Image (spheres, helix red, strand yellow):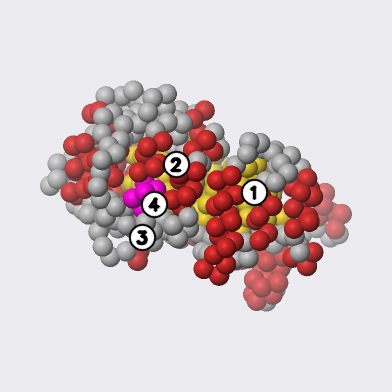
């Protein structure tokens, strides 16, 4: 037997002595490895992922070095969090030394330069692949830490320098040569070091860049309630990240917090020929969709265009869609404006590759009409409730839709009834498999009563404001008792399969 790391106190003679001294004994190293790895540790992990935190004394990982190593081997994706530290204590340092080689995901937030130097000098994060870090001190100390992470592939940085020191992005890329994804969040007043094309090499491994400036929020159900403070910047400031793109020829996904200028769009098109996802949003958003398959695409051209911003000028949207109309597979348009979005309705080409269209804006109905009329292969669509009118739904009857989002309102909705009747009559030829319903009220004679007759429906998602049992009582007469629906969710959102 051996004591917890760093302890030399004699072995207690009874369990009471052990409890009173608050000591730990390493018996794990005496057990067969397969018993620990396959029987003991999985039982602890069955409750869900557990994080290694330095701010919790006497952590379960603090029992002994052997226990820590065994645990980390099994919990390969465990996240380690280091927060609000001026310096690492001796005990914290020893704990990190034991766990460090097995940590794959690390959060470092609001710690001092001294702590960063301690991490760089004493802990070996040899398996670390994902790092989330808040930088608010000397960039030199952080760069030294980055140089000790040989297998880092995903780096998420929030930089807020009180001295307004330019952000040294190229130094980071030079240190982290295996990076495939880089997420940057810089404050409003931060600038970024610029580079001539010959000063730095191409960073061929980097395929995903997210660059956001200003106070940002997370993409939520009501995203228009949270805005960035930088939305009224000059165009030159909005294009701050564009020079970096000259070194990212293999970029697949690009997210910018503000729409780039037309000149910047030309640069993107010229220097990022592999770009497949362009996201213009000041909100953190997932880039990959079920339709866009980045690694399997061979033809160059944009597949996903996601616009979630409040500042547009002129024919910006028209030019974007015109430029990429032959390859676009998914358009997500969530813009909350007080004025209509300019769009040229006289475009004559078709969006033959478009499979998914999401539109959430109070203005510019002609844009919706144009997309629906010019996307013959549309498979999934989401429309605002007040724009689900007869003409659009009639057109959608002639589209191979597999998924649609509809609103069940208190008003009479003959167009919705007609749409579902059409798919019922199609029988086996109907491709409709998923429906999402936003429900405010279900009246007698509602089109909702037709849903159980859609024999090929695989997923029904219901979003409503009242108890779901009321909904099932409405549909009870139409549902086969042997096909009791599976319900997940809460009062605000229920999924029936």
Q: Find out whether the residues at labels 3 and 1 contact each other: C-beta distance under 8 Å.
A: no
Front position in the image: 492 or 434: 434
Magenta segment boundaries in residue numbering: 371-375
Mark 3 to mark 1 CA distance (whole Å): 38 Å
Residue 330 is marked as 4
Where does the image place residue 254, in percent across and percent down from the top left?
A: 33, 47
Which residue is disc 1 drawn over? 447
Direction from residue 431 to residue 341 in the image, left or right: left
Is disc 1 surrounded by few (<14), some (14 to 19) or many (20+) residues within 10 Å? many
Front position in the image: 406 or 252: 406
Q: Nearer the viewer, mark 3 or mark 2?
A: 2
Q: Nearer the viewer, mark 1 or mark 4?
A: 1
Mark 1 to mark 4 CA distance (whole Å): 28 Å
Badge 4 marks a residue whose secondary structure is: strand
Q: Is any part of residue 155 visible from this angle?
A: no
**If you read the primary sequence from the N terminus, does the residue marked by circle 4 or circle 3 appear first?**
3
Residue at image position (35%, 66%) is 296
Q: Quadrant of the N terminus?
A: bottom right
Is disc 4 surrounded by few (<14), some (14 to 19) or many (20+) residues within 10 Å? many
Which residue is disc 2 drawn over? 359
Which residue is disc 3 drawn over? 294
Q: Quadrant of the C terminus?
A: bottom right
**If you read the primary sequence from the N terminus, does the residue marked by circle 2 or circle 4 appear first?**
4
Where does the image place residue 190, in percent across and percent down from the top left?
A: 33, 28
């Amino acid at each position: 037997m051996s004591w917890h790391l760093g302890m030399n106190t004699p072995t207690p003679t009874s369990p009471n002595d052990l409890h009173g001294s608050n000591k730990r004994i390493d018996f794990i190293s005496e057990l067969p490895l397969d018993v620990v790895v396959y029987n003991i540790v999985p039982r602890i992990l069955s409750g869900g992922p557990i994080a290694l935190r330095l701010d919790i004394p006497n952590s379960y990982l603090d029992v002994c070095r052997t226990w820590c190593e065994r645990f980390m081997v099994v919990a390969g994706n465990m996240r380690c969090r280091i927060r609000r530290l001026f310096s690492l204590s001796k005990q914290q340092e020893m704990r990190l030394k034991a766990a460090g080689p097995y940590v794959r995901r690390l959060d470092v937030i609001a710690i001092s330069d001294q702590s960063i130097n301690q991490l760089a000098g004493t802990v070996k994060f040899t398996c670390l692949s994902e790092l989330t870090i808040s930088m608010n001190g000397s960039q030199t100390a952080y760069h030294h830490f980055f140089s000790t992470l040989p297998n880092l592939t995903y780096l998420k940085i929030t930089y807020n320098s009180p001295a307004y020191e330019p952000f040294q992005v190229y130094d980071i890329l030079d240190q982290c040569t295996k990076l495939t994804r880089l997420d940057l969040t810089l404050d409003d007043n931060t600038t970024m070091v610029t580079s001539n094309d010959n000063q730095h090499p191409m960073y061929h491994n980097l395929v995903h860049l997210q660059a956001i400036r200003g106070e940002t929020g997370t993409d939520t159900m009501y995203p228009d309630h949270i805005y960035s403070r930088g939305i009224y910047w000059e165009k030159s400031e909005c294009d701050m990240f564009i020079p970096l793109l000259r070194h990212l020829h293999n970029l697949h996904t690009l997210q910018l917090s503000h729409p780039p200028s037309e000149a910047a769009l030309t640069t993107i098109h010229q220097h990022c020929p592999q770009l497949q996802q362009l996201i213009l949003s000041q909100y953190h958003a997932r880039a990959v969709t079920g339709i866009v398959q980045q690694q399997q695409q061979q033809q160059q051209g944009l597949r996903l265009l996601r616009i979630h911003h409040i500042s547009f000028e002129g024919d910006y949207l028209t030019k974007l869609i015109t430029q990429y109309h032959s390859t676009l597979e998914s358009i997500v348009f969530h813009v909350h404006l007080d004025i209509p979005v300019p769009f040229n309705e006289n475009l004559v080409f078709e969006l033959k590759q478009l499979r998914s269209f999401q539109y959430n804006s109070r203005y510019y109905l002609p844009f919706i009409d144009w997309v629906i009329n010019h996307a013959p292969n549309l498979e999934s669509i989401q429309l605002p409730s007040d724009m689900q009118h007869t003409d659009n739904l009639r057109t959608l009857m002639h589209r191979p839709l597999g998924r649609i989002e509809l609103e069940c309102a208190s008003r009479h909705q003959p167009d919705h009834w007609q749409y579902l009747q059409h798919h019922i009559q199609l029988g086996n030829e109907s491709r409709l498999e998923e429906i999402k319903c936003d429900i405010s009220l279900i009246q007698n004679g509602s089109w909702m009563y037709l849903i159980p007759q859609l024999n090929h429906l695989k997923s029904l998602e219901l979003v409503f404001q009242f108890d779901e049992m009321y909904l099932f009582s409405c549909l009870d007469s139409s549902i086969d008792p042997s096909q009791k629906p599976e319900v997940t969710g809460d009062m605000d959102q229920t999924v029936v399969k």
